[in-house]
Amino acid sequence: MKIGVIAIQGAVSEHIDALKRALKERGISAEVVTVKHKGVIPECSGIVIPGGESTTLCRLLAREGIAEEIKDAAGRGVPILGTCAGLIVLAKEGDEQVEKTSQELLGIMDTRVNRNAFGRQRDSFEAELEVEILDSPFTGVFIRAPGIVSCGPGVRVLSRLDDLIIAAEQGNVLALAFHPELTEDLRIHQYFLDKILKNA
């Protein structure tokens, strides 16, 4: 089994480390691979789209031919986790900033996003979050974080903060405005592993 982490831009190593630790905790044998070019995604049982700069990320995904492979994988039910910029990339619609920069969103999740919902880099913060899939609060790390402003009927809202949706799930796709990989808490990565195992 292979889990692919998009590694063309953004916070990659922390997700790789968290996935490896989560796998070790469960005693599951799997390979965590970086995805920099097309041809890797079709072999993956799960895909992570990390944080970073969403405009650059969208452009590089399209240029490398990875965007179409991710859309195809999503259509086949492959579990996908998008964090921070990954949440933006997965969305169907963006705000004026997204439209102004002509970002090519993947359109996998029936959501509309506000790209800088929680301000700029200097406005980064942590918050204790109630997340529906977890049995106790999770410390969310928000760095120049986006938010979901609206979503379609097929989207399950998992958490809110300041009237914005910050965690949501649609079938095999999980999107978070915060960075679970920047904490020692592996519960969200474990939940993602469960989705992969159910789909295997």
Image (tube, rainbow, N blue to C red):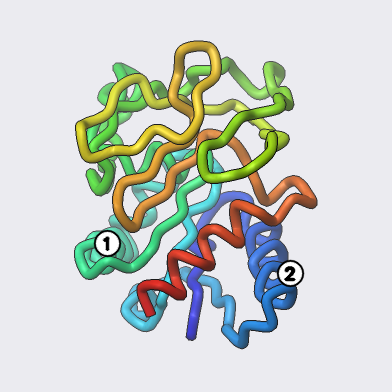
| Up/down of 37 relative to 82, above or below | below
Residue drawn at x 65%, y 46% as measured from the top left: 180
Q: Is residue 182 left or right of residue 12?
A: right
Mark 1 closeness class: few <14, some 14–19, many ≥20 residues within 10 Å: some
Residue drawn at x 69%, y 62% as measured from the top left: 18
| Up/down of 97 relative to 54, above or below | above
Q: How many marks?
A: 2
Residue drawn at x 70%, y 25% as measured from the top left: 127
Q: Position of residue 95 (x, y in %)?
A: 31, 20
Residue 109: image quadrant is top left
Q: Which mark is residue 32?
A: none
Q: Which mark is residue 74?
A: 1
Sequence-wise, the earlier of marks 1 and 2 is 2
Tag 1, which secondary structure? helix
Q: Is residue 185 visible?
A: yes
CB of mark 1 within 8 Å of CB of mark 2?
A: no
Name the kind of residue labelled 2 in the image. Answer: Arg
Q: Position of residue 61 (x, y in %)?
A: 35, 56
Name the kind of residue labelled 1 in the image. Answer: Ala
- Considering every residue shown, the one lying at the far top of the view is 162
- Considering every residue shown, the one lying at the far right of the view is 184
- Decide which of 64, 180 is in the foreground and name it: 180
Q: Which mark is residue 21?
A: 2
Q: Position of residue 191 (x, y in %)?
A: 55, 58
Q: Is residue 6 left or right of residue 111?
A: right
Residue 112: image quadrant is top left
Tag 2, which secondary structure? helix
Q: Is residue 65 visible?
A: no
| Up/down of 1 relative to 18, above or below | below
Mark 2 closeness class: few <14, some 14–19, many ≥20 residues within 10 Å: some
